[in-house]
Image (cartoon, helix red, strand yellow):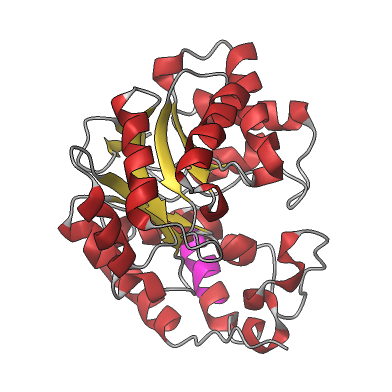
Amino acid sequence: MEYTNLGWSDLKISRIGLGAWQFSEAWGVVDYEAAKAVIAKAHELGINFIDTAMVYGRGLSEEFIGRALRELGIPREEVVIATKIPGEFLNPDDVFRAVDKSLKRLGVNEIDLLQLHWPPCWHNYPTGAYARALERLVAMGKVVHLGVSNYPVALIEELRSYFSFTDIVSMQYRFNLVERWAEYELIPYAEANDLTFIPWSPLAKGLLSGKYTPENPPEFKDVRSNEAVFHPENFKKMSELLNALKQLAEKYNKTPAQIALNWLLKYSPVIVPIPGAKTPKQVEENAGAVGWELSYDDWRLLDEISKSIKITYVTW
């Protein structure tokens, strides 16, 4: 496994993380033993960065992670736990209450990376008020580092202006070979400010895994059932890219998913994808995206094909 610093901090994280949204009813992994096996395999392969959120399964994902780490006997210093606090929990009083509950579910004394999951769009909490509460948690040792997820640059700047002694270390957003809006403002901002950029949905919810084709579309019974990238109007545009991923997978003796993830890793040294995994085999596949790299020409081939794909989210 390869490792890198979490933003400007000294904390080392694996270049591929383990996303944990799948430990919820949204994705269907609600069996604890299945989750434990995934976490065990991730640790075995050197993946030390686990990303979850308070809203995943309404705390179930955090509970599974905490229980698995204890039962597997994984030393606390060998895992970096990142969780996310939703926007509606960001009033100054609820910030403390939410983190207390999260710490209990995870069974830890501190959260390595607390990320703001999305802005408090529907509640209008003042940015300065919750920034101060978050900074108190850092001061008291309950949170080590802070990050943002799904925040626009202007609001990141406002948030950072309210901190007196700390700063964010990371930014998390949707970014993959077919959904690339983050590269215009967000990734350049992360690079300029020495922040880790964490792509969520790095495989476009499985679209880039090589399992599905426009001719044989999937029939999902999970969160992907209404996903825009799988809508027929969008999916039919993917053939050239999916074929290129398959051809490169054969060339490098890798899988299409590993090619797609390596494309992200080569895009920028600040990028740390967090693909999910429902099985230990999928963890192995994700981990196999590091330790090698696409040639410049092959990276450019995917880049050009990808740029020609225009996704519409107006699907109804």
Is 48 magenta? The answer is: no
| Of residues 153 and 158, the one drawn nearer to the viewer in this rendering | 158
Direction from residue 299 to residue 104 in the image, left or right: right
Can you give x and y, in whole percent of width and height, for residue 115 in the image? 43, 45
| Residue under the image location 59 percent in, 86 percent down | 237
* For residue 123, above or below residue 83: below
Direction from residue 94 to residue 234 in the image, left or right: right
Can you give x and y, in whole percent of width and height, for residue 280 in the image? 65, 35
* For residue 299, above or below residue 35: below
Quadrant, the C terminus: bottom right
Residue 224 falls in image quadrant: bottom right
Q: Magenta part mainly helix, strand or loop?
A: helix
| Residue under the image location 56 percent in, 43 percent down | 53
Can you give x and y, in whole percent of width and height, for residue 112 in the image? 39, 30
Quadrant, the N terminus: top left
**Range of magenta residues:** 243-249
Direction from residue 262 to residue 275 in the image, left or right: right
| Residue under the image location 22 percent in, 35 percent down | 9
Direction from residue 21 to residue 131 in the image, left or right: left
Can you give x and y, in whole percent of width and height, for residue 298 in the image? 34, 69
Residue 192 falls in image quadrant: bottom left
Q: Is residue 197 visible?
A: no
| Residue under the image location 21 percent in, 30 percent down | 10
* For residue 147, above or below residue 77: below
| Of residues 99 and 97, the one drawn nearer to the viewer in this rendering | 97
